RNA sequence: GGGCGGUUAGCUCAGUUGGGAGAGCACCAGCUCGACAAGCUGGGGGUCACUGGUUCGAGCCCAGUACCGCCCACCA
């Protein structure tokens, strides 16, 4: 390692950071071993999609969570940062299908088994990039414990979970309306949709009344589903239609008689105020249909084309069918008008194909009982979301959680552990059964559906530790402590981990969940690929360094939505550089020891300031207020440590005062410890240059509370006030002893000697302050009603200003 | 439509039980002697979105309005 004094005055993070990332891992300093003698602390990082890249949200939450992990490690806890990646069903299947398309083949051509093999090959080739990205961000994860949700052990846990829920009677099969993606030919949960503004046409169509007495007009954007209409609905209070409720209308084209019903879910102000009810192709219609006991015919097939409900339309595209139906209406003067209509329609978040609501036989998990212990745990704050507003959201979204559609009709994922015999009996088992549980038939076929990706994610905090086996790791590291995630993941994942942890292990999986800020682009828009506003955290790291990036993201993490700021990153880079150069100053004369021998006022003062900052950092982190931690450290280092303390001791340093240097190095050591959680690399690098390093900084003990250095704060404050006055107006204050020595060192001897500045202007300023304070104290109501300490403070100010005025007169 | 966050200096933001409007960057000026590819010092610059209320006193508390944004939602 090169000598400090030979080193570049510009701190260059690039080589340094990668070297420490390697060293920490190679020396096993991230490794977590079960140890009953030590208290454990576990940060479970959300497993990113195996196909994806880490984005700014990952970088932000990792900066926060890893800082806490590093703090806890220094505080002597047995820290495990658990990492891994998720198989991400549809997402991965998509990526591989694209890959296959470029080779001129397809999933269907290969068949299921060959396709799965190709996915695995693809993963072996590209799957390692996520872990590399963790390392570049300085994540202090136990890299030996990387888990994948498709690992054999993990699959076993998923199967156990399914069987457990099935045996509890909470898993059932039902025909329900679901979101169908015609491209992927699978159902999607509501949470996998993305609304997209779309240009549409709103057709107003007349449905003749069955009694021949006119018609009722209906506005619709999906005329193709008309053949599946089973009713016309109006709002019960709608005067225009009240007399029609109970009568019948005739569905155009198919000329079927359907009832006219009243339902409060109909919006009277939209369109004509009358709604066609098509239970098979619209979620609200489905709900209304079930409540009114209506049939559920389907006219659209899973491929998005017309079904054979109406033979003459079978196989047509929806557009073609719509054309036929509208033509039919037009010929009979039933098409009242067609108008342009722009509205948001749900699309598949992966391929942006318009969703077809469809009735389909799916597997469901009942939430009614499963969620109850989780709701209780949240209400009792056994699990707490931060900030508080997100806690309320978590509770209410759990309370409102509908039954969970857990089956997907894709190929990549955990296939349901369900087998059917030729008679249709269902056998559920963790591994393939020899015979049907009911009839004993050996002719079993396995359910082709796979589980929702989040079904396996729900087990992450304990399946990664070996559950369902009773492993040492599970006993040592469950329950964990910290989770970090984005807002929109609360319902998808956080809540599900909580209820599955409680159900399967009887304990909450973690105590605190940090819902990190959403990082917007610098212009305030959402970061997204399609908008071209995305910023890759690795690019930022390459350019500015990991520490600077971690600092910058921490610094901006104050509100719910925050703008990415290169300025904040740059501030972090300057902080690293400042500390680096402060260290060069202290190390350039070849130090032999770092030991506290505080003799002078400024030494007792800086040690007191460092101690106060230690307490502040701990307090802020306990409140998950990371932005202020960055702020406090910045000012400690720039203002207190460098601008005041180092300037004050410079004359003694240059005079070869060994005590001054040893004490300064000991003070630096403490500063490095405080900053390490946020900026691990530069602090470790400087630490390695300090004399007599017994251990790495990453595992050095965090400073204990220490009140030995309670400096004569008043004396230093007097110096700082004198300096401020001198800098402002050139008016020198008479100081003696230590106070004069520090003043001279910091404010510069050449200028301090003068002292014939604008005394008049300073006198005016002080007189203004005195007048203001006197006015306030003369206000009887202020003196009577303000808190006594406020009045007292005002009196003190008045006296101080008078003293200062005396000092310069 | 619902939930939530925001509006303070040219920019990005802080402002902790209500009591002197701040930081970083940018800009201007000076200094630069042995840490700092820079640093230090000083300066200019703000109707704290708006309206009303509570209070001796409001950036902060209350009510309302406007605008920006994020998330969620079954107006066909």
Image: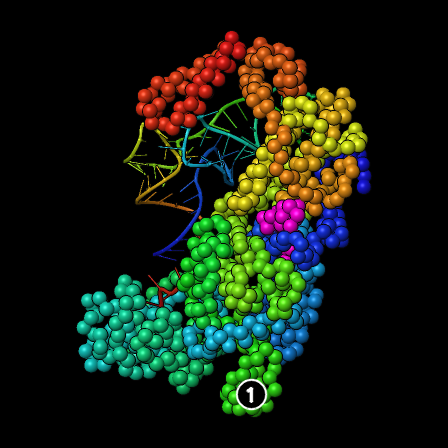
Q: Is residue A739 visible?
A: yes
Q: Is residue B65 above or below residue A669?
A: below
From the viewer's perspective, tell me whether residue A498 is left or right of residue A776.
Answer: right
Looking at the image, residue A331 lies above or below residue A569: below
| In this view, A7 is above or below A467 | above
What residue is rendered at 58% in x and 12% in y?
A734
Q: Position of residue A368 (x, y in %)?
A: 42, 69
Q: Which residue, as the protein is rendered here, is positioned at the far top? A: A809
The answer to whether residue A54 is left or right of residue A8 is left
What residue is at 46 percent from the left and 50 percent from the top? A388
State the residue at coordinates (58%, 40%): A617
* Residue A97, image x, y percentages: 61, 71
Q: Does residue A224 appear anywhere in the picture?
A: no
Is A418 situated above or below A15? Answer: below
Circle 1 residues within 10 Å: few <14, some 14–19, many ≥20: many
Between A266 and A191, the residue placed more toward the observer is A191
The residue beneath circle 1 is A436
Which stretch appears magenta? A63-84
């Amino acid at each position: 390692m090169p000598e400090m004094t030979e080193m570049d005055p510009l701190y260059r993070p690039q080589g340094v950071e990668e070297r420490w990332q390697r060293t920490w891992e190679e020396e096993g300093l991230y490794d977590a071993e079960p140890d009953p003698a030590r208290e454990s602390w576990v940060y479970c990082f959300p497993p990113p999609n195996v196909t994806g890249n880490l984005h700014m949200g990952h970088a932000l939450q990792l900066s926060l969570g890893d800082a806490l992990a590093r703090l806890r490690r220094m505080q002597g806890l047995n820290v495990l940062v658990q990492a891994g990646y998720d198989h991400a069903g549809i997402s991965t299947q998509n990526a591989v299908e694209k890959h296959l398309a470029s080779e001129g083949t397809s999933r269907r051509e290969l068949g299921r088994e060959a396709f799965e093999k190709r996915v695995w090959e693809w993963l072996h080739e590209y799957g390692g990039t996520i872990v590399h990205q963790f390392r570049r961000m300085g994540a202090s994860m136990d890299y030996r414990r990387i888990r994948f949700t498709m690992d054999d052990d993990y699959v076993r846990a998923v199967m156990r979970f399914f069987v457990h829920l099935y045996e509890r009677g909470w898993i059932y099969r039902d025909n329900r309306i679901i979101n169908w993606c015609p491209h992927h030919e699978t159902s999607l949960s509501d949470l996998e949709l993305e609304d997209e503004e779309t240009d549409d046409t709103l057709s107003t169509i007349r449905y003749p009344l069955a009694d021949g007495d006119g018609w009722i007009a209906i506005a619709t954007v999906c005329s193709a589903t008309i053949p599946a209409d089973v009713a016309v609905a109006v709002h019960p209070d709608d005067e225009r239609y009240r007399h029609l409720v109970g009568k019948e209308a005739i569905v155009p084209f198919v000329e079927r008689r359907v009832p006219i019903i009243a339902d409060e879910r109909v919006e009277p102000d939209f369109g004509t105020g009358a709604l066609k009810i098509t239970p098979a192709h619209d979620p609200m219609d489905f709900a209304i249909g079930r409540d009114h006991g209506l049939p559920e015919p389907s006219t659209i097939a899973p491929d998005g084309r017309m079904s054979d409900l109406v033979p003459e339309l079978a196989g047509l595209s929806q557009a073609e069918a719509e054309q036929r139906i509208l033509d039919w209406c037009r010929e009979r003067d039933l098409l009242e008008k067609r108008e342009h209509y722009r509205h948001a329609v749900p699309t598949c978040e992966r391929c942006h194909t318009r969703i077809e609501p469809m009735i389909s036989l799916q597997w469901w998990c009942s939430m009614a009982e499963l969620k109850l212990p989780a709701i209780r745990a949240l209400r009792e704050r056994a699990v707490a979301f931060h900030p508080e507003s997100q806690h309320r959201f978590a509770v209410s979204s759990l309370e409102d959680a509908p039954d969970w559609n857990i089956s997907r009709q894709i190929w990549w994922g955990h296939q349901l552990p369900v087998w059917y015999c030729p008679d249709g009996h269902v056998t559920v088992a963790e591994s393939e059964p020899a015979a049907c549980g009911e009839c004993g038939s050996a002719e079993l076929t396995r359910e082709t559906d796979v589980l929702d990706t989040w079904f396996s994610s729900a087990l992450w905090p304990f399946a990664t530790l070996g559950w369902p086996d009773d492993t040492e790791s599970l006993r040592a590291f469950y329950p964990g402590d910290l989770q970090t995630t984005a807002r929109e993941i609360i319902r998808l994942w956080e809540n599900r981990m909580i209820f599955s942890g409680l159900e399967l292990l009887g304990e909450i999986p973690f105590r605190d969940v940090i819902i990190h800020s959403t990082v917007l682009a610098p212009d305030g828009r959402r970061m997204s690929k399609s908008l071209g506003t995305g910023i890759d955290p690795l690019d930022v790291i390459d350019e500015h360094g990991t520490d600077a990036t971690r600092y910058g993201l921490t610094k901006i993490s104050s509100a719910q939505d925050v703008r990415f700021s290169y300025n904040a990153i740059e501030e972090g880079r300057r902080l690293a550089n400042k500390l680096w150069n402060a260290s060069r100053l202290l190390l350039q004369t070849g130090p032999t020891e770092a030991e506290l021998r505080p003799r002078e006022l400024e030494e007792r003062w800086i040690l007191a300031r460092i101690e106060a900052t230690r307490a502040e950092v701990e307090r802020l982190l306990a409140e998950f207020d990371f932005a202020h931690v960055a702020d406090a450290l910045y000012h400690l280092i720039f203002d207190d440590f460098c601008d005041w303390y180092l300037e004050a001791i410079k004359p003694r340093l240059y005079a070869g005062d060994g005590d001054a240097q040893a004490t300064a190095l000991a003070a630096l050591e403490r500063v490095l410890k405080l900053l390490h959680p946020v900026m691990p690399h530069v602090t470790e690098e400087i630490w390695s240059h300090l004399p007599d390093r017994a251990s790495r900084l990453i595992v050095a003990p965090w400073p204990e509370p220490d009140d030995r250095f309670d400096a004569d704060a008043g004396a230093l404050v007097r110096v700082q006030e004198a300096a401020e006055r001198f800098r402002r107006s050139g008016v020198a204050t008479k100081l003696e002893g230590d106070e004069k020595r520090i003043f001279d060192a910091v404010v510069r001897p050449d200028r301090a000697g003068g002292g014939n500045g604008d005394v008049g202007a300073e006198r005016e300023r002080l007189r203004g302050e005195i007048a203001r304070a006197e006015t306030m104290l003369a206000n009887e109501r202020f003196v009577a009603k303000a808190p006594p300490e406020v009045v007292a403070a005002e009196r003190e100010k008045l006296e101080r200003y008078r003293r200062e005025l005396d000092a310069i007169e």
